[in-house]
Image (cartoon, rainbow, N blue to C red):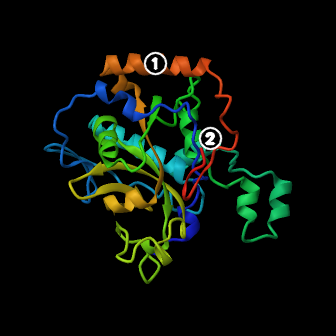
Amino acid sequence: MEVDMDALAGRLAAETDTRTLQLAQYLAYLDDDSPATRYGLQPDGKFHLGDVKIDMPAGEAIGDVGYQNCVPAAMALLAQGWYATAKEQFVPTLDDTLKIYEKVSPFHRDAEPGLAALVEKQPNSGHREAHNDFGTSLLLALKTWVHPEQPLTGLLPEARSFLEIEPRNLDQLREGVLRFGGVLVGLALPQSIKDGAGALRDSWFVPGYGSIYDATAGSLSSHCVAITGFNRREFFCLSAGQVRRLSPEFLLTYVEEAYTVLSGAVLDANPALRDRITADVAEIRKADRPGGMPAFNHRWRGGNIM
């Protein structure tokens, strides 16, 4: 299947906020049992919980249909992983993701008639301009998900907090999947994930010649996926309706941001962690941005300007 580049777009440039809680802060609140060598979504399309396998119904396409909605789609697929962990099935729909998209960005499905007529003469960008279909910030979407007023109630399960993964820390990626059901990652996708016919490869890896030419970071698009499974050799996500196999080196090369989201059920099962995070969040909400922190907080390829 040939996939349009635009179908994989939608994540705005990675942002940073010095107030964001870090997973590394809370590792002491997690048990130190030996990690599983295989957990969650696997190449067979099922969610593996030890000897138990949970079916993951394909449902309709939600992230490869022409909207720049990869962030809301990844959020919905992360929630699907949460339900699977509880041995339940949840099938997100395109309508679900578009409603989330409207909550976390200026996007709107019903364009104002006058504006729609005006941009109709611009076939390449008219749809985007009419609907404000320009994607969203992953960090902003997460802040909306955990907002005290719960604006995403009815669209996604409750999320109480999110933790940032340290850059290039694959162990924390596995912890995020194993302990909290998954990790949302922002990827600067290279053209090399497509084969000669223009179809997405099942396996995403760094070519032998390195991250240059068609393997240059971001040469295809900016994307967001929910990593909800791993084994000893790879990580797994759903993208464009299929399980994709991501090599560790691919993630080390192309991930620009990564967060794990904490559901209410997970926190309630670990009262010490819940109470510590609750206290830390309360303290953060009383604090202002540090005086020396610049207003421009985007991360660009080559490092974090912070």
Give the percent coordinates (x, y) of residue 304: 56, 49
Quarter placement of the C terminus: top right
Frontmost residue, 38 versus 210? 210
Classify 10 Å Cα crowding around label 2: few (below 14), some (14-19), many (20 and above). Answer: many
Residue, disc 1:
278
73 vs 9: above or below: above
Quick check: 150 left or right of 232?
Answer: right
Q: Is residue 262 above or below residue 211?
A: above
- First of labels 1, 2 by sequence position: 2
Residue 104, numbered circle:
2
Q: Is residue 156 above or below residue 254?
A: above
Q: Residue at x 74, y 71 (%)?
A: 123
Side of 111 where 286 appears, left or right: left
Q: Nearer the viewer, residue 213 or 61?
A: 213
* Residue 199 on image: x %, y %: 44, 76
Label 2 amino acid?
A: Val
Q: Residue at x 31, y 21 (%)?
A: 270
What is the secondary structure assignment of the residue under circle 2?
Answer: helix
